Amino acid sequence: MSTLVWRAAAELHKGRKAGTGQSPTIVAESWESMQRPCRESTSGVYILPARSLRESAAVFKPKDEEVGRGSGRVLADFGRGSGAVREVAAYELDREGFAGVSETKMVKLSAGGLEKEGMLQAFVDNIGDAEDYGPSLFGVENVQRIAAFDIRIMNADRHAGNLLVSKTEGVYKLHPIDHGLSMPDNVRTLPWPVWMDWEQVKQPMTAEVKEYIMNLDPHSDAELLRSKFGNAISDGAVDALTCGTVLLQVGASLGLSLFDVGKMIYSIDTETPGFMERLLTNPVVNHLANVLEQNFQVESRCSTIVELTLESASLLAEIDPDKVHDLVA
């Protein structure tokens, strides 16, 4: 059982730990003993209190209280009840805490004779969210790490409210939460994230961010998801992760900014297919991908198309560097 689960079980007011199955069970006195967040939330969210009741130990989101979020075509790619799995998957993928995703586990919470399964996430002490502060307060490295992670997992829900803010010795820091709308079942145009309007992502990738991106292994990530979650996460979601990772890597190798890469999958108008979605349905590109698949072992159709197209764009860059930026405009 993880440290998070043990701690949450121990700190629950009059709570006790129980169960040793795949999804550990935490027992609380009642659902009413747990607070609801002061900010609005469309899905069920419970804050597990510490013994003092003045501090929070963890946040619990039950699968059966998930409400379909998003709109139009985007909403169709996230089945109700799948958000908890995606939240846990996002934590597992954030190796070494690169983006700062708080520890997240799948558990069962029993209270008042009613048991619910969902995701348990360590509470992040904060002084508000990004909606309360100007973006200039946040460091380039901090913002770029979150932006790179969002592109990698194709996050469809990065508004200012799910970037919590902390302040330590005068330094402000962002903490990403709410990844239930990441790794969609189909790769399509996603809603414009808040950081796409910030100057930090329009600057060149930092050396640390670029190095991290180039060291990612999308095929190992795919195996991680399949081994840990099985049928609970779709092949389409795994493909989206692979596609997002390859997109980042090729973009980094071409010297694109995270803003340039983000324009390939994000748009203010999600009902109109953007660059990536048009690319994946282009008949010429798909024909070339078919030829490659017939002659080589290919892990992901999406990543094959991304590599094929953007590597070709690098040839254009040798003639005119602006061509690469024109391609994603």
Image (cartoon, grey):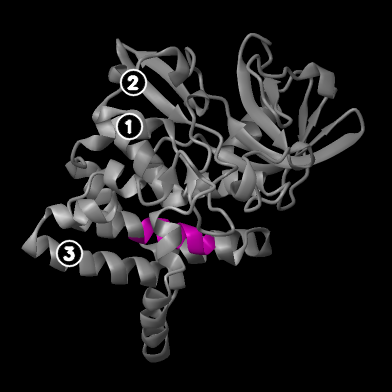
Front one among 132 and 324: 324
The disc at residue 314 is 3
Q: Quadrant of residue 199?
A: top left
Within-10-Å neighbours for mark 1: few <14, some 14–19, many 20+: many
Disc 1 marks which residue?
Answer: 143
- The numbered mark, 3 or 2, whose residue comes first in the sequence reads 2
- Mark 2 surroundings within 10 Å by alpha-carbon count, few (fewer than 14), some (14 through 19), many (20 or more): some
Which residue matches tag 2?
Answer: 135
The percent position of residue 324, horizontal first and vertical second, equals 20, 56
Give x and y (percent) for residue 317.
12, 60
Q: Toward which corner of the image does residue 285 lie, by quadrant?
A: bottom left
Quarter of the image with the N terminus is top right
Closest to the camera, between mark 3 and mark 1, is 3
Amino acid carrying label 3: it is Ser
Q: Is residue 92 left or right of residue 47?
A: left
Q: Amino acid at mark 2?
A: Pro
Q: Main secondary structure of the magenta part?
A: helix
Percent coordinates x, y for residue 312 in the rendering:
22, 70
How far apart marks 3 and 2 lie (CA) works out to 32 Å
Instruction: State the residue lying farthest toward the front.
Output: 272
* Residue that appears at 66% across and 18% down: 37
Outermost residue toward the right in this view = 113
Does the magenta-highlighted stretch encompass residue 244? Answer: yes
Can residue 144 be seen by looking at this rendering?
yes
Please name which of the two marks, 3 or 2, marks the residue nearer to the observer: 3
Residues in magenta?
A: 238-246
Most distant residue in the left direction: 319
Report the amino acid beneath label 1: Val
What secondary structure is found at the residue carrying circle 3?
helix
